[in-house]
Image (cartoon, rainbow, N blue to C red):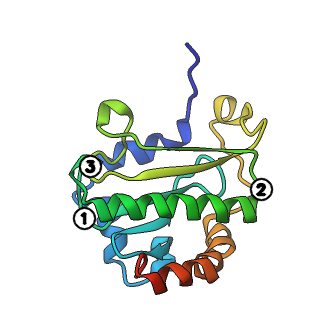
């Protein structure tokens, strides 16, 4: 079995279990989407940057409704989540030109969910050779850009013609 260590996430994971309020619900309550790193709000879900990304462009899609598992979600919510996944992949391909993606959910603490009571979908751009020795040896993760740069790079793309077309059709509000 191969293990991938992510020591830079230790502080975050330990604090998530102590938080009284869900990180997604807290983000939604903030008045400023930029400060919350929310890139787009739909009618059922929203898209935001992961504050502790594995790679630049690491996005998450979460429903507005605080649910611990996707089976409890309404069809409209899961349909929009699927549309948002396609939109995220398209925008990330345009802006970052990754070689591939990881997309998935960790449902429940035993499955690796840092936030187990509000399900969410991760979209992680990947490049051939994007892992290196720095996280293991130096407990350091190297990034080509900070979160504000990533936000600026992606936010305008969530307002392109495709998104506005979906909005006109009533799929996104």
Q: Could you tell me how far apart the alpha carbons at marks 1 and 2 are, in whole angstroms?
A: 32 Å
Residue 113 point in image, percent of width and height: 36, 41
| Near-viewer residue (85 or 122) | 85
The residue drawn where x is 63% and y is 83% is 161
Decide if residue 117 is on the left or right side of residue 81: left
Placement of the N terminus among the 4 image quadrants: top right
The residue drawn where x is 74% and y is 50% is 98
Give me the disc on residue 65. 1
Relative height, residue 172 to residue 54 (above, below): below
| Residue at the extreme front | 169
Whether residue 78 is visible to the viewer of this picture, yes or no, is yes
Q: Which residue is mark 2?
A: 97
Residue 19 point in image, percent of width and height: 27, 54
Residue 157 point in image, percent of width and height: 65, 76
Placement of the C terminus among the 4 image quadrants: bottom left
Circle nearer the N terminus (3, 2): 3
Decide if residue 6 is on the left or right side of residue 110: right
Please tell me how crowded label 3 is: few (under 14), some (14-19), or many (20+) other residues with Cα within 10 Å: few
Residue 13 point in image, percent of width and height: 40, 43
Whether residue 49 is visible to the viewer of this picture, yes or no, is no
Please tell me how crowded label 2 is: few (under 14), some (14-19), or many (20+) other residues with Cα within 10 Å: few
Relative height, residue 36 to residue 108 (above, below): below
Decide if residue 2 is on the left or right side of residue 153: left
The residue drawn where x is 45% and y is 82% is 169
Tag 3 secondary structure = loop
Q: Could you tell me how far apart the alpha carbons at marks 1 and 3 are, in whole angstroms?
A: 21 Å
Relative height, residue 20 to residue 41 (above, below): above
Give me the disc on residue 18. 3
């Amino acid at each position: 079995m191969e293990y991938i260590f992510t020591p830079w996430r230790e502080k975050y994971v330990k604090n998530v279990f102590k938080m009284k309020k869900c990180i997604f619900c807290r983000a939604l309550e903030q008045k400023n989407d930029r400060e919350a790193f929310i890139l787009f709000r739909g009618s059922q879900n929203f898209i935001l940057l992961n504050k502790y990304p594995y790679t630049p462009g690491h996005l998450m899609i979460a429903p507005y409704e605080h649910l611990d598992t996707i089976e409890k979600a309404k069809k409209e919510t899961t349909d929009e989540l699927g549309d948002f996944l396609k939109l995220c992949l398209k925008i990330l391909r345009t802006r970052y030109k990754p070689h591939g993606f990881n997309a998935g959910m960790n449902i429940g603490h035993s499955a690796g969910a840092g936030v187990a009571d509000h399900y969410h979908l991760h979209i992680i751009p990947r490049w051939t050779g994007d892992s290196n020795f720095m996280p293991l040896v130096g407990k350091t993760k190297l990034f080509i850009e900070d979160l504000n740069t990533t936000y600026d790079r992606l936010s305008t793309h969530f307002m392109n013609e495709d998104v506005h077309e979906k909005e006109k059709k009533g799929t996104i509000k």
